Image: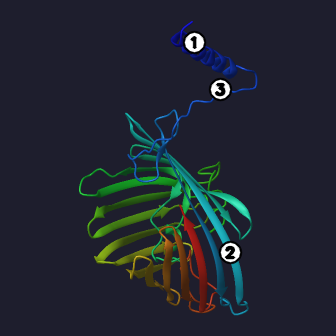
Amino acid sequence: MNMKTLLGTAAGLMVASGAYAADLPGEAAPAAVDYVKVCDAYGAGFFYIPGTETCLQMSGRVRARIAYSEAATKTGADSLSFKTDARVGFDARTASDLGTVRSFFRIKLDSADGTITADDAFIQVGYLTAGKFGNAYGDVFYGDTSAIYGAFDQSSTGALVMVDKLGGGFYVGAGVMASDTGSFGTDKTKWNPTVWSTGSSAELMYIGRLGIADQSWGKVDVSAFYQAIDTADNDIWGVKATADLKLVDKLSARLVGVYEDYDRYDDSYFGVAAALKYKATDSLAVYAGIGTAFWDKADTAYKAQIGADYSFTPDLVLTAEVNYTSDGGVSGADFGNGTGSTFDDSFSGMLKLTRNW
């Protein structure tokens, strides 16, 4: 037997023994790897769910704060407190013959009562949105405490048609949401609201929006609502215009004007607010805002805010902020639903660490 024959025999034995060893009991065969692929069709952060054509984005936020609050009532007490909250959102999108099919929901954890609650959750098919969502763009100030105007800061279950492919960044939409608020000013059934029952009228909120976005100078949004409440004369309606503007390099602004009318109180108010944000460096941004509400039958209410954000990384931000609220005293006004606030002038401040992803 020559050397070539010996080498061939040895190689054959090695292959055979290797194959036999791979089939021995207890030796699991390695599973096939299904790599996660990036999905760039819908922006940053999306990836394909393995084995599907659906793109998923998972985002979230954790905030830890220490906050000081001055007494806001005549008999109240000053306080210093810790607060932690978190949220996580899931955004799934799939291309179809009907347009993009999207589902979104967000879960929140709040240390105020230690509960986990669900935020907005909806399905979008093309221009149609169905589920639970907010009735308008609410935030005005850049900081943690926003000048949000009463009934525009509501979220309920309903349906909305929003057409956003009109050209030039223009969009228009209209919808209807449940308005089952129980006693005035409290939303008891956000997720399963009763629209109509025997012996009562339908409680609905009709909403409309139009605007222009994605412009070099910013965006403008105009929204309106009419809220029917089947208890005495409690209907509410309002109109609001909001603008996000890019003024000059590193300087941006937010402006809002709003009018709301409350049948229950036979009262109404006109509110305005403005905020500026300046990006001093890549890491440091400073902001300030002021807002006021002019009531027909109550004193004028004011809010003011100043703060700064320092970014250790693009998504780890330290914030220092001070807020001032003037609600006109015991018989004064406020920024919420209706008049008659018992709040007095007050200051608050906080130091907050936020981690976004």
Residue 67, by quadrant, is: bottom right
53, 175: nearer the viewer = 53
Query: In this rendering, would 315 be left or right of 341?
Result: left
Image point 52% across, 67% down: which residue?
A: 153
* In this view, 113 is above or below 27: below
Q: Earlier in the sequence, mark 3 or mark 2?
A: 3
Residue 17: x percent and y percent? 66, 18
State the scheme by which the image is colored.
rainbow
* In this view, 160 is above or below 214: above
Amino acid type, label 3? Ala
Image point 42% across, 54% down: which residue?
A: 44
Q: Which residue is farthest left?
A: 168
Real-space CA distance between mark 3 and mark 1, rounded to the nearest whole angstrom: 31 Å
Q: Earlier in the sequence, mark 3 or mark 1?
A: 1
Real-space CA distance between mark 2 and mark 1, rounded to the nearest whole angstrom: 77 Å
Q: Which of marks 2 and 1 is nearer the N terminus?
A: 1
* Residue wearing tag 1: 6
Amino acid type, label 2? Lys
* Residue wearing tag 2: 83
118, 129: nearer the viewer = 118
CB-based contact (under 8 Å), mark 2 and mark 1: no
Classify mark 2: helix, strand or loop.
strand
Amino acid type, label 1? Leu
Classify mark 1: helix, strand or loop.
helix
